[in-house]
Amino acid sequence: MQPILKKTASVLLFCIVSTGQLLAQQLMGFGAEAARKEIDLETTFDKQLQANNLRDWMKLMTAYPHQLGSPYGLKNALFIKEKLVSWGFETKIDTVHVLFPTPKVRIVEMTEPTKFKASLTEKPFKEDATSAQTKDVLPPYHAYSANGDVTAELVFVNYGIPEDYEELKKLGIDVKGKIVIAKYGNSWRGIKPKVAYENGAIGCIIYSDPKEDGYFQGDVYPKGPYKNETGAQRGSVVDLPQAPGDPLTNGFVANAENKRLSVEEAPAMMKIPVLPISYSDALPLLKALGGQVAPAAWRGALPITYHIGPGPAKVHLKLEFNFDIVPCYNVIATLKGSEFPDQWVVRGNHHDAWVFGAADPVSGAVAELEEARALGELAKTGWKPKRTIVYCWWDGEEPGLLGSTEWVEKYKTILSEKTVVYVNTDGNGRGYLGAGGSHTLEKFINQVGRDVIDPEKGTSVIERLRSRTIVSGNPAARQEARSRPDLRIGALGSGSDYTPFIQHLGIASLNLGYGGEDSGGDYHSIFDSYDDYIRFKDGDFAYGVTLAKTVGRSVLRFANAEVLPFDFSNFSNTVQMYATDVKKQLETARSAAEEHNKLLAEGRFEAVADPKEPKMNITPMPVAPYLNFAPLDNALTKLQESADTYAKAIGKSENIPAEKLAQLNQILYKTERYLINPEGLPRRPWYKHQIYAPGFYTGYGVKTLPMIREAIEQKNWTEAEAGILRVTEVLKNFSAEVDKAVNVIQ
C-alpha cells in the first residue's frame, strides 16, 4: 500500500502546485510573481482565522440590547475599538448625533363590532436565554412613524403596494379616511404606509402573515426557526427611497453647525401613524372584517376567510414617540498603505441592532473583526498593504443607514478623492454566496469566489452557487450559468451601508454574504438571539469563517493589486441587458394597454362580469408612445467598443512604468464616479447614480436605469425621454474614461 500512497501524495502535490501556478497566472491585477506572493499571503491569512473567536464575540455582543444610542451599543463600540487597537490598527470612534425616535404610547384596539386590545408583546421562551429581558428592550414599533390618535374602519390591502391599490380601485374600495392593515413582504416596510398615505389612509398596521413568515413555512420558534404567533418585526419606515441618514439633515452633516429641520418639516418622516403587530394580534382584526372576499392571491394562512372590508371592524390606533437626538458611534480603524497611502480600500458592517441582533448584524460584524485580527497578525510579521485599508463598524444602520450616511456626508470630498472600493457585509448564515455590486467588479468577485472553498461541499463557493442556479434558476438563468464564464451578480438598491458610497458618491461597491440554508422568522424580533443563531443559522460558524475568507481576499487583492482589478466588459453586457429590458417593458405596457382598451370598447369585461358580485370599476389605460432609444443604443455600442479595447490592452500589457501605472489606477477607480449625475434622480436628488437606485415604490429593491424605468412605470413619457438622454450622457462620459485608461496603457 505504501508505494500507492506515495504516488497519490505526489500526484496531489503536483495538482496543488499546478493549481497554484494557474491561479497565479489568472489573478486579476497581478503579474505572475506578484500573484504567487498574493496567494501565499492569502493562505497565511486563512490559517489565522478561528471560528471560536466569532462564537465568543457574538455571545458577548448579543448579551444585551444594543440599539442606536443604548448603553450596550456604546459598550460594544468600545469593545471593538479596544480589540482593533490591540491588533495594531489606528482606531477612533467617530461620533455624530442623530434623530432616533422611540415609543412612548402604543395602542391598537378594535372598538367595533367587538372589543379587542392587541397585546403588542413578544412571549419569552425558556429555550432562549435572552428573550425574557425587559431592560432597554425596544418593543415592536416603527421608527420615524408619525404621532397619531386615529379611529376608523379597517381595510385589508394585501401587501399595501401600488398594484394592490389599483386592484382596490377596480373593486370600488376607497381607503380614504380609513386605517389599512397590510402584510409584510413584496416591498420594504416603509413603502406600505407611504402608499397608504398617498391614497388617503389615516393609519397603517403591518403584520407578518404565517404564509410567508410563520407556521406555513415550517415549525415555529423555539421548536423550529420560523416566526411564532407573538413575534413581530421592528423596523424603520423613514422614506428611504428619498434619502437615507438622519431625516432632519438629509444631504448635510448632522452637527451643531447645521440647523436641523423640525420633525414636522422633514420630508422623509412618515406622515401617518404606523405600527407592526404579530399574527396573533392581527387575527381578531382580520376575522372581524366583512365586505368582499379577498382575491385568491391576497389570502394568507390564518384560519379565516380573508375579507377586504371596509369594516365592520373599526380600529383605534394611538402612537406617541420620544423624538430624541442620540449619539451614533462609528468605529473607524486604519492600516496605512506602504506605497499608496492615499488610495483607500474601505470595508464595513454595522454593529447596532433592534434588540440582540445575532444574525443581523453581529454575524457579519464578528466576521469582520476576525478579518481585522488576521490582518493584524500579518502586520506583526512585517507585512504592509500597498494601499490603506479602512475597517468600519457602523452605528445606526437599522433606523436608516444613519452612521454610514453621516460619515460619507461628513467626509465626502476626501472619500470621493481617495476611496478605491467599498466592500460591505451585513447578516450572514449557512448556505450560498450572495454577491451584489458594481458590475465593473463582477469578474473580480467571481475570481474571489473561485478561490474560496465551501465548508459543506468542498467545492468552490462560486461553483456551488453555479450548481444552485443550474438546478433552481429559470430556463434562461440555467442556460447562462452553464455557458457564461462569470455568474451574474445582483445590482444594488438600498437596505445596507453600501448605499451612500455607491448611490451618493459613485464609489464602486460590493455587498457580500452567505445564506439560503438559514431561513427563519427571527428578523428584527427579540428572537434574533445567540441561542437562535447557534441552533438554526451557522452553529459552528463555518460560514462566518468563509465570509472572512471571501471578504478578506477581496480587501487584500484590492489593497495589493498592481493594476486595480476593474473589468468593463461585464459592465457593458449588463447595461445592454438593462436597456433591452426597459425597451421590452415599454412594449409590454403598450400592448397591454391596447388590448385592455380594445376589450373595454367591445364590452368584453361587462359581458363576463357576475351580476351578483360588486361591479368592477374598469377604465381606459393610457397607451405608451414610441420613445427614441437611438442615443442610448449608440452609447451602448461605444461602451462595448471601449470595454473590448481595454480588455485587449490590459491583457497584453507588461511592466507598465510606475508613473503610468499610478495614472492608470487613478482613472480606473474613479470610473464609477462618471455614472452619477449631480442633479440626482427626479424628486430625490440625494440618489445620484444613473444605473442603479432603490425603487421609489420598492425601498430596498433595486431599479436599474431608474430614471427611464420608473418614468415608464408611472406613464411619464416626457421624463422617460429625458432619462434616455441622461443615461446616454453618463455612459458616454464613462466610455471616455475607459478610453483614457487604454491610452495610458498604450
Image (tube, helix red, strand yellow):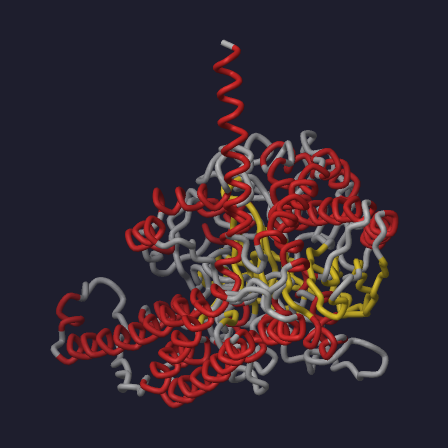
Report x, y in % for residue 198.
50, 77
Q: Is residue 30 above or below residue 598?
A: above
Which residue in the rendered view is the most extreme toward the top?
Answer: 1
Is residue 271 visible in the rendered structure shown here? no
Residue found 49% across the figure and 33% down from its top? 457
Nearer to me, 146 or 178 = 146
Is residue 499 visible in the rendered structure shown here? yes
Report x, y in % for residue 481.
36, 50
Q: Quadrant of residue 344?
A: bottom right
Residue found 36% across the figure and 74% down from its top? 579
Nearer to me, 582 or 669 = 669
Q: In this rendering, would 162 be left or right of 587? A: right
Residue found 52% across the figure and 59% down from its top? 436
Q: In this rendering, would 663 be left or right of 88? A: left
Looking at the image, how many numbered discs can be counted on the residues? 0
Q: Quadrant of residue 541?
A: top right
Nearer to me, 131 or 249 = 249
Q: Is residue 27 above or below residue 499?
A: above
Report x, y in % for residue 647.
45, 67
Nearer to me, 523 or 627 = 627
Q: In this rendering, would 710 be left or right of 412? A: left
Q: Is residue 654 above or below residue 593?
A: above
Report x, y in % for residue 446.
49, 53
Q: Quadrant of residue 573?
A: bottom left
